[in-house]
Image: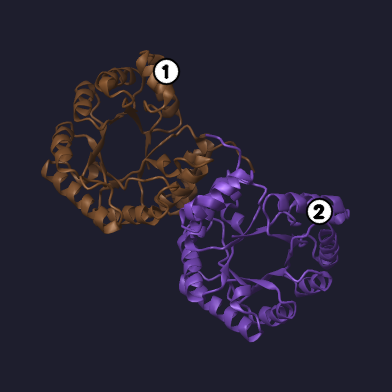
Chain colours: A purple, B brown
Amino acid sequence: MLIVAERINATRRSIARAMLERDSRCLAREARKQAEAGADLIDVNAASDPTAEVENLRWAVEVLQESTDLPLCIDSASTEGLRAALELVQADDVMLNSVNGEPQRMRDVLPIAAEHNARLVGLLMDEHGLPEGVEDRLRVAEKIVREADRAGIGLARLYIDPCIRPLSTSPDQVEAALESVRRVMAEFPGIHTTVGLSNISFGLPYRSILNRAFLTLLITAGLDCAILDPTERDVMATVHAAEALCGKDEWCMDYIGAERAGVLRPKDD
Amino acid sequence: MLIVAERINATRRSIARAMLERDSRCLAREARKQAEAGADLIDVNAASDPTAEVENLRWAVEVLQESTDLPLCIDSASTEGLRAALELVQADDVMLNSVNGEPQRMRDVLPIAAEHNARLVGLLMDEHGLPEGVEDRLRVAEKIVREADRAGIGLARLYIDPCIRPLSTSPDQVEAALESVRRVMAEFPGIHTTVGLSNISFGLPYRSILNRAFLTLLITAGLDCAILDPTERDVMATVHAAEALCGKDEWCMDYIGAERAGVLRPKDD
């Protein structure tokens, strides 16, 4: 399971302020905390202020490269933002978040991703918006896979995201999202699937318990990457528990190892 | 979701001691705690000392009837224990835990359950032990359903238990258990399914996180009853979260209601 750590996101007030004030220690601290908690990549999003996004993103990328060895996930809806951030990235391994099935967006983002040999998140939405049914989502997936392939990006670099909406407003989407993960993993062997986990619980109380329950279902459906907050220890423990339950961790060796390494919460029973 | 509260079980040292010392306040306290946490029935098991089981069970049933209005679940592998406890039960609603597909056990237990119009847990095991595959489990379920029907016990009173074994020793059983729940619910409309949840995590660290992840999968598969510890607030919150995710709680009204009633853990985010 590839963990993309979500905390360095300017929609969080503390991060927006850190970017405004060029508080590099705040970003470094967030990166370190997430790395220690088990992150594989550090997502960086500077989208709070559109007029300053590109500048803030470049600053953040430079700060993060000095403070962590983990690869970055450049998270921007702006092609200019992605391109400007990538210019600064020194590591071979980088993820772009994201492309979708919109023709113009694919024309913009796919060449950049191909040029940098980047991992690429592909959202299952396009110029018609967010499809409701599984078949429509699969058609968007096919489109992204086809165009990515033409641009020279193989399945192993693609992370398809079924675009989770809040349970409170879209109660019927859960099975469609799970089925999309199952189908994408089955129909494109070697591809990856990912979600922005916490969207599911937006607007609801005690969000973490919903996030964890949904993560369990997603992992059992085949999900192999998630954008989440690894400093929530119960969420990381849920990753290990779900992988043990769905047969990805024979004899629970990883689960027991995670407990010994102190990754699980201290024993409560 | 019917919650059968598991804490009054003599395999727990404090309960064994309470039974030995006739500490009725301990049992009353456990019953009250579990009722407040959301239990629908109180399981009572006195199986620590076989020579005293019947006597202890009768004592416990009398104590519990004085201390809680909730119906009891009489939990005993001994027919004599079930019969002796039932003699004392005053409520119309009672559950027996359990029968299985063994012919002698069915001959012993089904008439007692029918006579008392009891709910009845039916374990998917028989004289040949615990079947491995789903088809073999389904054959045991059919046998129990058929014989229960002959004894006058309808589907609505039957709670089929796929018999969860520890994940640490039986890593391959999870999908079979989930599929058994799906198949039993689909093939016998009106029947119920239940599990002794905590068996899954026996021998593993941080048991609660595995229990909750497994419970999420089971509820999504159709499980509508579980024997668990309702005083673990995260477990009860998981019940509400899983039901919201799998479409059993439209617009999350029960989930939000549970939070307002203070059933979920205090907001952590």
Viewer-side residue, A168 vs B213: B213
Residue A243 at what x, y percent from top left? 51, 55
Residue B73 at what x, y percent from top left? 30, 31
Spatial separation of the CA atoms under disc 2 and disc 1: 52 Å
Instruction: Identify the amino acid type marked 1.
Output: Cys
Residue A211 at what x, y percent from top left? 56, 51
Viewer-side residue, B25 vs B157: B25
Residue B25 at what x, y percent from top left? 41, 15
Q: Residue at x 14, y 32 (%)?
A: B115
Task: Tell me the subunit letter for badge 2.
Answer: A
On residue B256, the disc is none
Residue density around tag 2, few if under 14, some if 14–19, many if 20 or more, within 10 Å: many
**In the figure, B163 relative to A180: above or below?**
above
**In the figure, A44 relative to B242: above or below?**
below
Quadrant occupied by the N terminus of chain A? bottom right
Instruction: Identify the amino acid type marked 2.
Output: Leu
On residue B26, the disc is 1
Task: Tell me the subunit letter for badge 1.
Answer: B
| A134 displayed left or right of A193 | left
Task: Evaluate whether label 2 is on the same chain as label 1.
Answer: no
Residue picked out by circle 2 = A27
Badge 2 element: helix
Q: Are marks 2 and 1 in contact (CB under 8 Å)?
A: no
| B90 displayed left or right of A37 | left
In this rendering, does residue A204 appear at all? no
**Image quarter for residue B105?**
top left
Q: Residue at x 63, y 81 (%)?
A: A148
Q: Residue at x 57, y 69 (%)?
A: A192
In this rendering, does residue B195 appear at all? yes
